[in-house]
């Protein structure tokens, strides 16, 4: 006969009263550094200036180094024995692998979103799109990029698959810098906006096959631009 184990009442009451931990300082520092790396404030291949950053943020070395461990796990930082923390370099080979997987994930998310998204989710994505167009018209790249990411994340969320969302988030951090770089080209930026118009149309029409193909092509076009940028720098 199986026995059911119960949690003591006093343990439950203690858990209820325990304060919920707030976001740690090192996580806030990691978010700030992540934005600096994505937007080019910290260039690939350079040593992270720890002392300068501590002074700028008004923090000690401990939260900074904890933040660097987070970024190293995300593939944005290389922790080297003799050089300390170095911003990782993007290579054509690694980008090919990342974009191939991400393209498949986004295509699947698009197909599923067309089946499962409710009207509110689609309206929310449409709102992001309209605000994004305003930032593009004013050449506000950082704000544009933030809304752009919310659109892609919104489509993934609308797919309603927690496993897909989890895998997507893990890769999204690693690919975000490349996606940002693709917009350095005005021609590519304008083309990306046109592609987003088609993406939104397919989502509203709930044409999963078309949306999946558009999302895959959208990433493929970004990849070619980023690889060109990398080759020109090397």
Image (cartoon, helix red, strand yellow):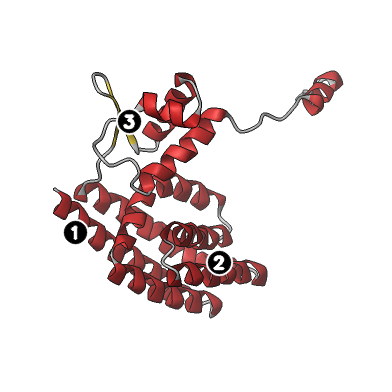
Q: CA distance from mark 3 to mark 2?
A: 34 Å
Q: Is residue 149 above or below residue 196?
A: above
Mark 1 vs mark 3: which is more N-terminal?
A: 3
Labels 1 & 2 near each other (Cβ < 8 A): no
Mark 1 vs mark 2: which is more N-terminal?
A: 2
Q: Position of residue 63 (x, y in %)?
A: 49, 24
Q: CA distance from mark 1 to mark 2?
A: 29 Å
> Crowdedness of circle 3 by 10 Å Cα count: few (<14), some, many (20+)?
many
Work out whether residue 205 or residue 62 is closer to the camera in this orientation and state it. 62
Q: CA distance from mark 1 to mark 3?
A: 25 Å
Work out whether residue 34 or residue 116 is closer to the camera in this orientation and state it. 34
Instruction: Quadrant for residue 209, please give it.
Output: bottom left
**Residue at image location 77% in from the left, 23% down from the top:** 5
Q: Position of residue 207 (x, y in %)?
A: 49, 77
Mark seen at residue 228? 1
Q: Is residue 159 above or below residue 187?
A: above
Secondary structure of residue under mark 3: loop
Mark 3 vs mark 2: which is more N-terminal?
A: 3
**Residue at image location 28% in from the left, 30% down from the top:** 47
Residue that numbered label 2 is attached to = 128
Secondary structure of residue under mark 1: helix
Instruction: Quadrant for residue 174, please give it.
Output: top left
**Residue at image location 80% in from the left, 20% down from the top:** 11
Q: Indicate left or right for 76 with 153 as reference.
A: left
Residue that numbered label 3 is attached to = 48
Q: Position of residue 46 (x, y in %)?
A: 25, 35
Q: Indicate left or right for 54 with 233 as reference.
A: right
Q: Is residue 30 above or below residue 188?
A: above
> Crowdedness of circle 2 by 10 Å Cα count: few (<14), some, many (20+)?
many
């Amino acid at each position: 006969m199986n026995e059911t184990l119960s949690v003591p009442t006093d343990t439950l009451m203690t858990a209820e009263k325990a304060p919920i931990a707030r976001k740690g300082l090192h996580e806030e520092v990691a978010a700030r550094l992540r934005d600096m790396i994505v937007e080019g404030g910290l260039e690939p291949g350079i040593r992270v200036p720890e002392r300068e950053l501590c002074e700028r943020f008004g923090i000690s070395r401990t939260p900074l180094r904890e933040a660097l461990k987070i970024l190293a796990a995300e593939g944005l930082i290389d922790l080297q024995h003799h050089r300390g923390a170095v911003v990782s370099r993007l290579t054509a080979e690694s980008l090919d692998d990342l974009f191939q997987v991400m393209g498949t994930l986004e295509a699947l998310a698009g197909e599923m979103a067309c089946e499962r998204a409710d009207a509110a989710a689609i309206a929310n994505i449409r709102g992001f799109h309209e605000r994004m167009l305003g930032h593009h018209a004013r050449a506000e790249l950082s704000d544009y990029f933030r809304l752009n990411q919310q659109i892609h994340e919104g489509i993934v969320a609308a797919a309603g698959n927690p496993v897909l969302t989890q895998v997507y988030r893990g890769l999204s951090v690693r690919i975000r810098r490349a996606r940002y770089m693709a917009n350095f080209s005005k021609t590519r930026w304008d083309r990306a906006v046109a592609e987003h118009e088609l993406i939104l149309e397919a989502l509203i029409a709930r044409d999963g096959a078309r949306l999946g193909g558009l999302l895959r092509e959208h990433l493929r076009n970004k990849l070619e631009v980023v690889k060109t940028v990398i080759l020109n720098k090397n």
